[in-house]
Image (cartoon, rainbow, N blue to C red):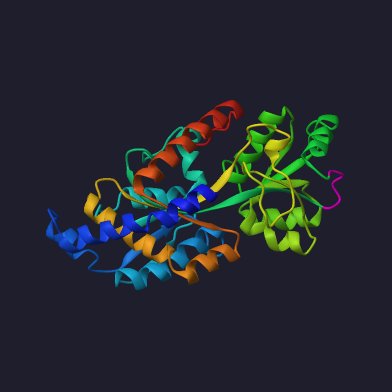
Amino acid sequence: MQVRKQRFIARSATSTLLAAITACGLGMPVAAQQFPAKSIRIVVGYTAGGTADLVSRLVARSMSEKVGQQVYVDNRPSAGGLLANELVANAAPDGYTLLLANSSFAYLPSMYTKLIFDTRKDFVPVALVATTQNLLVVHPAVPARNVHELVALAKRKRGALNYASAGTGSSNHLTVEMFDLMANIKTTHVPYKGTGPALVDLMGGQIDFVINDLSSLITYINTGKLKAIAVASSKRNAGVNVPTIAETVPGYEAEAWYGLLAPAKTPPAIVSKLYDGVIKALRTTDLRERLKATALDTVGDTPQEFLSYMQRDIAKWTKVVKAAGVKLD
């Protein structure tokens, strides 16, 4: 996480260079030189109020000031964000329709047997905007103070422990599937229609545990309604005094991310302008502080860096989906 922050700070020079090239319009088509000439839409595949929606609205607000045109959010909720992905994949490649993608984007190619879009061919990366650590939390009544005790409990009561997710194939479903595989345990999946209802039942004691992004859990941890026992990243979090899952289950890592994608064939010059607008937005103190307040770390990876990041994530989750046998139609 620290390495990305350093890259983000150092990248200001790159952003300035992109801006200079854009201003000169060297070799750019007229449309690219004039971009943006109208409002830009960020399509989000989830309902208002979630972390993806929050990230998109904060970025849209700040980007509007930087690019000189309104940037607005269009919520198109559906399972796995499929509707939003399809809409953007089929949009005109002119830079005016973007997708706010998150971690679940990396699962789609291996999980769905029939997709009418190709996650590898129908999109181009603009910028990795933010990341947040996932956290393993349990109901306070669960007799486990750490991952070692939770794994031991699961082995004694094989299949008796249950966990909630925002739905089959969601990020907090697959993060536990990977945990089960790597820890050699078996727990029972209880899918919900969204993270909100899942957390309600977790706090009510109907559910034993969940792995979900820190930004959605921090309030409940601070008020004692949920008990944090480990972070799912490779490094500990200074704000949450718990070890990593990897300290007990070596190699385990599941980071939540949020980034912007454009339709394939969007001209590189327009992608550069969009990236420059995102970077200028992320450099503002107000946006960074707002993201930090919800346990989100600003990143700002370039399109190529974001592409490499997604390729690694897709490769990792393809193995998990195959091993867990998760398939959707």
Does residue 108 appear to the left or right of 19 in the view shown?
A: right
Residue 183 in the image: above or below residue 165: above
Q: Residue at x 53, y 34 (%)?
A: 317
- Which segment did they paint magenta? 140-144
Does residue 326 appear to the left or right of 63 in the view shown?
A: right
Q: Residue at x 47, y 39 (%)?
A: 108
Across and down, in percent, residue 31 comes to 16, 60
Does residue 106 appear to the left or right of 127 in the view shown?
A: right
Across and down, in percent, residue 129 comes to 45, 55
Asked whether residue 96 appears in the rendered view, the answer is no
Asked whether residue 138 appears in the rendered view, the answer is yes
> Residue 13 versus residue 155: which sits nearer the camera?
13
Q: Is residue 142 magenta?
A: yes
Q: Residue at x 43, y 35 (%)?
A: 114
> Residue 99 versus residue 307: which sits nearer the camera?
307
Across and down, in percent, residue 280 comes to 37, 64
Quarter-wise, where is residue 275 in the image? bottom left
Residue 157 in the image: above or below residue 310: above
Q: Main secondary structure of the magenta part?
A: loop
Residue 83 in the image: above or below residue 58: above
Across and down, in percent, residue 175 comes to 62, 40
